[in-house]
Amino acid sequence: MLKKKITPQEVAIVKKDFETSRNVVIVCHTSPDGDAIGSSLGLYEYMKRKGKQVTVIVPNYFPDFLHWMKDADKIVRFDWQKTASYTALKMADLICCLDFNDMRRIDDLGVAVMRMRCKRLLIDHHLDPNRQQFGHIISHPEMSSTSELLFRLLDAMGELNSLTFAGAEDIYAGMATDTGFFSFNSNDPDIFLIISELLRRGIDKDKINRNIQNNYSPDRLRLIGYVLYEKLQVFPELHASLFAIKKEELTQFHYLKGDMEGIVNMPLQIKGHKLSICLREDTERPLIRVSTRSVDDFPCNEFCTEFFNGGGHKNAAGGTLECTMEEAIDIAMKGLETWHDRLADVPSKEEDKKDAKEATTMESVTGIEDDKKEDKSEETKEK
Ligand code: 5GP
Ligand code: MN
């Protein structure tokens, strides 16, 4: 039995939106990740089961390691398939917006979506959704993933019997990828109740993990070696690190989109590390893409909003910079400097007080203060 996180009002909103729509479009964020594709295809499966006409439209490329999912080949790419995209959008009486909180996160597709006069329903787990852009909002930033939110919605609607095997695979993939295979943001015991429910539907989680994690070229492994050996700058005092990789370097490793996936997490394997920053030159546009990862309470999202025109979650956030790599590195260094006190082991005020108290006690025990007095008198003598 899951904790009740979905309110009856939310159930009523979603039920009504679903029941009153026949032609549905599902969109998710630019450069979709496992959660964006997993939740979109999971909802697609459900909608199909309910007899709807459904199209998933993504703004651009999504990585190879997500192509095993059922019906991934039916996903329409807005950057390549404008006619198919507009046909579906114009027919739609409901557009479900998954795994993003602002139309700017879906680039030109956002402009197209905003032009349509149909209902827009947001289902998402990012902070601060842009309330003006969506008719109905189901926003749960406390959840691990949009895929978890989708499962909980279906559960609250009493619709779990319409969750198919493929839908269960999709939801598992989304939850697994957004939590680094349950290594962060996944302490809610409900997550494992959900996983057990998905396993009961017959999914092979080990195979899904392999499909996602072990699906790369030899070049990608060499790229990891290169980044870690040649490019990684570690700032031990700050428990932070930074690496910056240019287009020419990526080309050297026959870069395919998705090859950089997860590399930004690796420096967090360093003992005591708090923050990892990756700067990557975009291969198509004159941009630097920023990815950051942190542990515990270092807020990557605030850091990325302040320095990289971005945002995201507390422990995983990103942004973009329109400048040269050298300038981007300067900005990142400035960021590290600004957040120095949150990163370095600066003793807290409480610790300062404790140290001062301990020092006083030591003085009275050892008579250090008396020695100091003697030293001073010596100094005076010398002068
Ligand atoms: P990644 O580092 O994997 O590209 O992104 C991690 C998370 O950061 C994403 O799930 C998303 O929430 C957020 N994110 C990445 N890039 C941007 C960006 O340009 N703007 C905003 N607002 N969030 C971003
Ligand atoms: Mn997500």
Image (tube, helix red, strand yellow):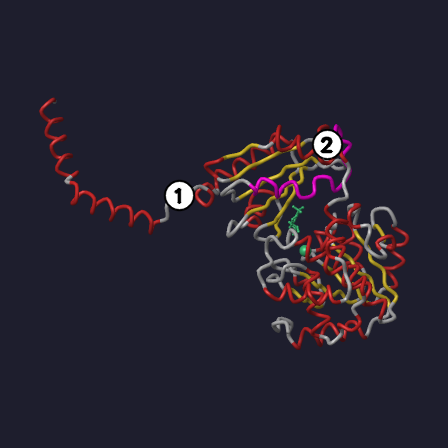
Question: In the rendered view, would you say 310 is above or below 371?
Answer: below
Q: Using the image as rendered, state which of residue 199 and residue 194 is in the foreground.
A: 199
Circle 1 Cα neighbour tier, 10 Å, few/some/many (<14 / 14–19 / ≥20)? few
Q: Which residue is mark 1?
A: 346
Circle 2 Cα neighbour tier, 10 Å, few/some/many (<14 / 14–19 / ≥20)? many
Q: Using the image as rendered, state which of residue 219 and residue 329 is in the foreground.
A: 219
Residue 311: horizontal and vertical position, in percent?
61, 50
Question: In the rendered view, would you say 25 is above or below 344?
Answer: below
| Side (left or right) of 77 relative to 131 | right
Q: Secondary structure at mark 1?
A: loop
Amino acid identity at mark 1: Val
Earlier along the polypeptide chain: callout 1 or callout 2?
Answer: 2
Q: Is residue 267 located in the magenta-colored stretch of the structure?
A: yes
Q: Which residues are magenta?
A: 251-269
Q: Tell me the quarter of the image containing the N terminus.
A: bottom right
Marks 1/2: CA–CA distance: 37 Å
